[in-house]
Each structure stands twice: as C-alpha cells, then as structure tokens.
C-alpha cells in the first residue's frame, strides 16, 4: 500500500465549509481524488505550486475540495484557462480535471490543440461514459447501444477512444487506468506530472446512480469489479493469449515521448534567441 | 483632402490637444496600432487571440513585439480559447488582453461573463464590422453596442469605452486597462472599423501624464484572505495564483471566499457587489465630451467615428450662426444617463446618427420620459457606409 496515510490526505483538503461533497454514493470520483492527492504528496510538490483547473461536470467539482490554487471554469474550457496560467507562470504544476463530455465534446477542440502544442500540463479525464452533472445524457464515450436519457432507444453514435484521440493529436504522454486501480492511478498521476509535456490520463470511473442504473450494470461494487475484470495492464498484454486480450481495456502508459519539445520551453527559447539577437545588434 | 476634411482635421487638433504639451514627434498611426502600442506601454504581458478582420493588426503587432518585451503571446485555436487563456493568465497575475471583431466577440461572451462573475481584470478589444453574421468584414458598423452591454447571459454591468480618433484610441486603451484593474472586471474597448484601419498623424501623449493603475494586492496572511471581501466602494484586493494565496475561483455563485454557495443571503451579497462596484463609481468611470453645448438648441448625440462627422456639421452650422452642439460619450456603458438627461432638458431637438438600426437612440429615448417635448431625430445606416458630415448637416438644417 501507499506510504501516504489517510492523515496526509486530510492535510490537502479544505475542511472549512466545503463538505459534504456533491458526489453521489458509490461514485468513483472521490477515489480518483484520493489517488491524485497521494501522488502529489509523494512527489512532495508544494501546495502553492499546484494549479488545479477544471471545467464543468461532476468530476470538475474536484478543485473546490483541495487546498491548492484552484479554478473551476466553463464547460469544456479548462485547457485554455490552464494554457493561460501555464504560459504566464511556467513553473506551476498545472493539473486539469475534466470529464469525458467536458474534454471531448464541447472541449474537443481545446483537448486536441493542447496536445498539438505539447504544453506541459496533466489532463486527467475522468470517464464515466455519461453526462453525470446534467442527469445522464449520452457523451462521446457512451458505448453504442447503451441507454442514456437522450438516447432512450440506444445510442447510435460510435464512441471516441480518448487515449487514441490524444495520441492522434500528438500528446506526448498518454495513459489509462480505472478507479478500481487506485494505486495504479496514483502512480500514473505521478508519471504524468513528472512528464514534461501534455500528459493525458484517462481514468475510467463508475457512475452507478445514473449510467449503471440506466444500463443495468449493478451497484457500485459490481461496477468496480467490472473495471477490475475487464481491463488488463499493458505489461501483461504480450504474455497473454489473444483471446484473453480481446475486448479488454488496456491500462498503463500507452505512449510516452520525452523528446518532443514542450510549448513553454519553446517560447522561452524564442525569447532568449530574440534577446541574443538584439544584444548582438546593439 | 477636401476643404471640409481639412477643416475637420484642424478642429480635431484644437479639441484633443487642449492641454499644453511639449512639442513631440508626430507619427502616422493606425487605430489598431494605437491599441497595441498603448497596451504595451501600460504593461500588457499576456495576449491570446484568434485572427479576424478588422482587428488582426493588433495581434500581428503584439506577436512581433511581445516576446522581446518578455510578455507571453499566443494564437489560440479560437476566440473561446483566447478569452479563457486571458482570464487564466490574469488570475495568475498578468495584465491580459485579447482583440477580435463581431463574430469572435460573440464567441467570447460566455468567457466575458465568467470574467465579470469572478471579478477578473481583462481587456477585450472589439473592432466592429458590419453584421449580422460574418457580414461585411472590412466595412464599418456600430452594431455591437448592445452586444457589448448584454451579450453575455445573466445580469452584470459592463464597462465599455468608445474612442473617436487614433490618439484617443491610444488613451482609452490605457484607460481600459486601468479601469479593469481597478474594478476587477472585463472592460471592452469598442472601435469602429474605420478607426481600426485609418491612419492619422498623431502626437502621442507622454506616458507620465497617465497614472497606471495596478490591481490591489492582499496584505493579509493567506488564512485571512477573502477573495471577494468588500470595502465601501465594493472593491477588493486580488491575489495571484502561485504566490501563497491558494484561493478558489468559480463561475458559480460564490461566497466571499470564492466557494460555491446556494445561500440566498450570500448570493444577494455577491450580486449586489457586482452591480454596486460600478454604479457607485459612475463618476469615475463615465467620460463624456461636450462640444459647443453651452447654448445649443439642437444637439447631436453620437459615438466614435460618427461623432467626427457630427463635429464637422456642428462647426459648419455654428459658422452660419446656429446654436448647435455635440454630446459624445467616451464611455458608452455605463450609459451617461445624467449628461443625456441634462442635454434633453436644455435642447429642443436631439439628433442621433448611428451605423445600425437603432441601438444608441434607444437609450436616449429611454431617458425622455422626464421631458416629453424634446424631439429625437434618427439617422441610421446599416449598409457598410459611413454617415457623412453633410448628411448630419442636412438633418440638422431640417429642424432648425
Ligand atoms: C456551455 C454549456 N453547455 C452545457 C452545459 C451543461 N452541462 C453541465 S455538465 C455537462 C456534462 C458533463 O459531463 P462530463 O464532462 O462527462 O462530466 P461528468 O458530470 O459526467 O463528470 C453539461 C452538458 C454547461 N454547463 N455549459
């Protein structure tokens, strides 16, 4: 188990007025929050250096509970807000908390352009396959055939694979895990923060009260078991026969490229080269 | 140059160069250039934008200049991203601006509302083009007057400035930053397309003439910091991210610490401060120019480039011995109710020329209930052309 105790987690929460939280019983977002905090504690990043930015949705309510610099923005827009902060204060560790709808529907454009720029931030997409906050409408990751309040006859849209989307757009770090694997989440958050560049971490998350109920997925623990049983670590993929891998969600780091120059570093370089040129001319 | 234009130019000099200034270098400058140059002078250190005619020169100049001056410049993927990046940077401590035109301004409205709600200083320049929709990219229009006031959903006051010359564009850009920092809000600078693109010989004001306002910073220890603490004038200090004050900002209704609230008392307090910080300081915010108004029987009420057409007409008529004047707001929001009421009381007829189908006149009419007998005449054009001094001259002649 993690060396970081429950007590430490408490040191990172804002106790004054902010609790109880907005999440439903059985929701996985709180588990992800725990993993994020433990990762930050283990990395020993000063609270003042952490900037947590979110969009709008259930998962995006996370920043209010943590004692960091926190910004709860507009639906789909956390990445441009974070871009402004990072570019102006490049020393800050910017963490974006977003949902599947927030990141890939309304915010799809920003999601891919952040990747293209390779600007240093950690984008944690908590994917519950549904719009939680607005009560269960389908999202770009709702599997075809599933039920949502705005597709009561079954979803006819094909879903996005968030990690493939990030890879396609040029993100330099892309990983996936599930809320069931909280220690793995913690470690991947660490890796993502340590990576200099645009890091996408998709965390599959259970929404038993809406998605689970609509699609008869069972209660919260059943949904957690499902995440356990239907995913495999990328490290195990090669060792397993093909039929065991088929239809499974692959967890782990799917891409990491440490050679891609990062955006704020490129900007700093530009500034320096212009200065040198000006000095020479002077 | 026609004699009329020459005359206008001469008068212009008399009007804007009233304060005695040491002789300075005259430069040929475009309105858009004036925005960029003034912003740099006032300490702009973050710009995010997306190209759109007729505002693009602002971005182009800043892209050239900002890296050298150690500011951050970025071309975002759209206008929505631009305003969001600007707000983020401002909360991190930047003096931040974006520039756009009508369609881009529409896209920014949700973000502008966020800046107002969260009381984050920023400047948005809208070099208006004729609409609706993509309309006429290179033609003038004054069609965004209401969008700049009411474009964003919800209910929050606006500060909008409207210059009439290149030199004044320079001055009002500085003022836009000062007001945004002081009142912790998004300030809009509205420009007419002609002004954005027109080159004028200007003698730039000495920067020492201006007081540069920087936002109030908290002095209390972080534990005591209230993001929206208010003093008598509803203005409160604003910390920057990353400097020890780990505050929360949200577009949701919030309490004085910036945390979401559903309590009616806290919501009412928040709404009141958003409104009061502007309404209690109207005298500081609203600027208006009165031109030959002392004994005027007929007054033109106009903004921006049309005020210049009007000035020529007024001068011509004064020479003929008629008592005519011009009232021109440099701040269009908050609307200069008091000055307009006074004008309505003192004149027989008000003439409102505007490059739209009736946005400005609506506000003047709103104030006529005090005085039914004052006549309001409209001149409206929404075809991409300007209203000439001659057209205003003729309209005034009709009522004299
Ligand atoms: C511009 C805009 N459109 C729509 C909404 C309504 N809305 C709020 S949250 C949300 C979806 C959130 O879904 P997701 O990002 O998947 O997050 P979750 O709530 O499931 O965590 C929507 C559509 C909004 N707030 N703003």
Image: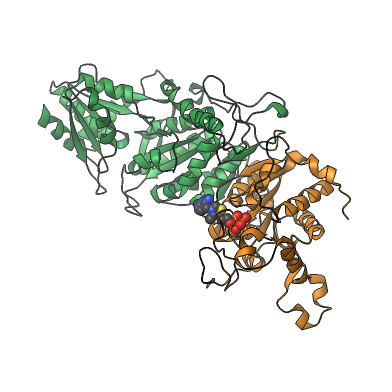
Chain colours: A orange, B green
Q: In which quarter of the image is residue B255?
A: top right
Q: Can you give x and y, in whole percent of width and height, for residue B254 in the image?
A: 58, 36
Q: In this view, does B331 lie above or below A22?
A: above
Task: Classify A149 as above or below B184.
Answer: below
Residue A202, position in %: x, y? 69, 61
- From the top left corner, tell me how far across and down residue B188 is, in percent: 44, 37
Comparing B242 with A74, the one in front is A74
Can I make out residue A192 in this image? yes
Relative vertical location of residue B177 with respect to residue B208 in this rendering, above or below: below
Query: Which quadrant of the figure contains the C terminus of chain B?
Result: top left
Q: Residue at x 69, y 26 (%)?
A: B224
For the point 63% across and 50% down, the residue is A60
Of the pair B365 and A139, the residue shown nearer to us = A139
> Left or right: where does residue B40 sit relative to residue A186?
left
Q: In which quarter of the image is the N terminus of chain B?
A: top left
Residue A266 falls left or right of residue B73: right
From what the image shows, is residue B140 above or below residue A197? above
Q: Residue at x 43, y 33 (%)?
A: B157
User: For ligand 1, which image quadrant applies?
Assistant: bottom right
Residue B179, given in percent of the width and then of the height, sits at 49, 29
């Amino acid at each position: 188990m993690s060396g970081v105790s429950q007590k430490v987690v408490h040191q990172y929460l804002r106790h004054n007025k902010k609790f109880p939280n907005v999440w439903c019983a059985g929701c996985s977002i709180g588990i992800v929050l725990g993993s994020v905090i433990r990762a930050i504690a283990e990395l020993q990043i000063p609270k003042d250096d952490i900037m947590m930015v979110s969009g709008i949705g259930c998962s995006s309510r996370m920043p209010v509970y943590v004692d960091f610099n926190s910004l709860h923005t507009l639906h789909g827009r956390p990445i441009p807000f974070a871009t402004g902060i990072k570019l102006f204060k490049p020393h800050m560790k910017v963490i974006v908390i977003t949902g599947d709808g927030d990141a890939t529907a309304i915010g799809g454009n920003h999601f891919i352009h952040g990747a293209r720029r390779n600007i240093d931030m950690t984008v944690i997409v908590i994917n519950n396959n549904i719009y939680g906050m607005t009560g269960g409408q389908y999202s770009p990751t709702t599997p075809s055939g599933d039920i949502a309040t705005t597709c009561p006859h079954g979803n006819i849209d094909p879903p996005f694979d968030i990690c493939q989307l990030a890879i396609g757009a040029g993100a330099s770090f892309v990983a996936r895990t599930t809320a069931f694997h909280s220690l793995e989440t913690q470690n991947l958050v660490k890796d993502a923060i340590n990576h200099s560049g645009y890091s996408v971490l998709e965390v599959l998350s259970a929404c038993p009260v809406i998605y689970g109920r609509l699609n008869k997925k069972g209660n919260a623990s059943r949904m957690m078991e499902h995440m356990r049983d239907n995913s495999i670590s990328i490290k195990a993929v090669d060792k397993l026969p093909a039929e065991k891998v088929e239809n499974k969600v692959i967890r782990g780091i799917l891409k990491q490229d440490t050679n891609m120059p990062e955006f704020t570093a490129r900007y700093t370089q530009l500034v320096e080269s212009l200065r040198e040129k000006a000095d020479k001319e002077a | 140059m026609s004699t009329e234009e020459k005359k206008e130019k001469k008068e212009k000099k008399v009007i804007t160069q009233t304060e005695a200034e040491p002789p300075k270098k005259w430069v040929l400058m475009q309105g858009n250039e004036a925005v960029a140059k003034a912003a740099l002078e006032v300490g702009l250190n973050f710009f995010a934008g997306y190209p759109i005619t007729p505002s693009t020169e602002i971005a182009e100049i800043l892209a050239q200049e900002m890296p050298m001056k150690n500011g951050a410049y970025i071309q975002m993927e759209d206008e929505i991203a631009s305003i969001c990046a600007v707000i983020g940077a401002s909360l991190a401590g930047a003096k931040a601006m974006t520039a756009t035109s009508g369609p881009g301004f529409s896209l920014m409205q949700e973000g502008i509302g966020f800046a107002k709600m969260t009381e984050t200083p920023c400047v948005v320049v809208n070099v208006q083009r004729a609409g609706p929709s993509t309309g006429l990219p290179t033609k003038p229009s004054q069609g965004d007057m209401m969008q700049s006031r009411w474009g964003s959903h919800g209910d929050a006051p606006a500060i909008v400035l409207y210059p009439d010359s290149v030199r004044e564009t320079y001055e009002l850009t500085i003022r836009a930053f000062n007001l945004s920092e002081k009142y912790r809000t998004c300030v809009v600078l509205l420009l007419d397309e002609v002004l954005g693109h027109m080159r004028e010989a200007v003698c730039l004001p000495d920067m020492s003439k201006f007081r540069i306002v920087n936002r109030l910073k908290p002095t209390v220890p972080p534990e005591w910091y209230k993001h929206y603490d208010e003093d008598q004038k509803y203005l409160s200090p604003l910390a920057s991210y990353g400097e020890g004050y780990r505050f929360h900002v949200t577009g949701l209704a919030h309490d004085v610490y910036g945390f979401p609230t559903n309590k009616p008392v806290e919501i009412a307090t928040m709404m009141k401060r958003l409104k009061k910080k502007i309404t209690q300081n109207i005298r500081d915010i609203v600027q208006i120019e009165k031109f030959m108004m002392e004994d005027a029987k007929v007054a033109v009420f106009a903004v921006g480039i049309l005020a210049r057409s009007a000035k020529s007409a007024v001068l011509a008529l004064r020479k003929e011995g008629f008592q005519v004047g011009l009232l021109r707001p440099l701040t269009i929001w908050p609307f200069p109710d008091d000055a307009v009421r006074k004008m309505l009381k003192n004149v027989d007829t008000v003439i409102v020329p505007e490059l739209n189908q009736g946005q400005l006149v609506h506000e003047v009419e709103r104030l006529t209930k005090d005085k039914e007998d004052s006549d309001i005449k409209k001149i409206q054009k929404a075809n991409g052309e300007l209203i000439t001094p001659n057209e205003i001259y003729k309209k005034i002649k009709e009522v004299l």
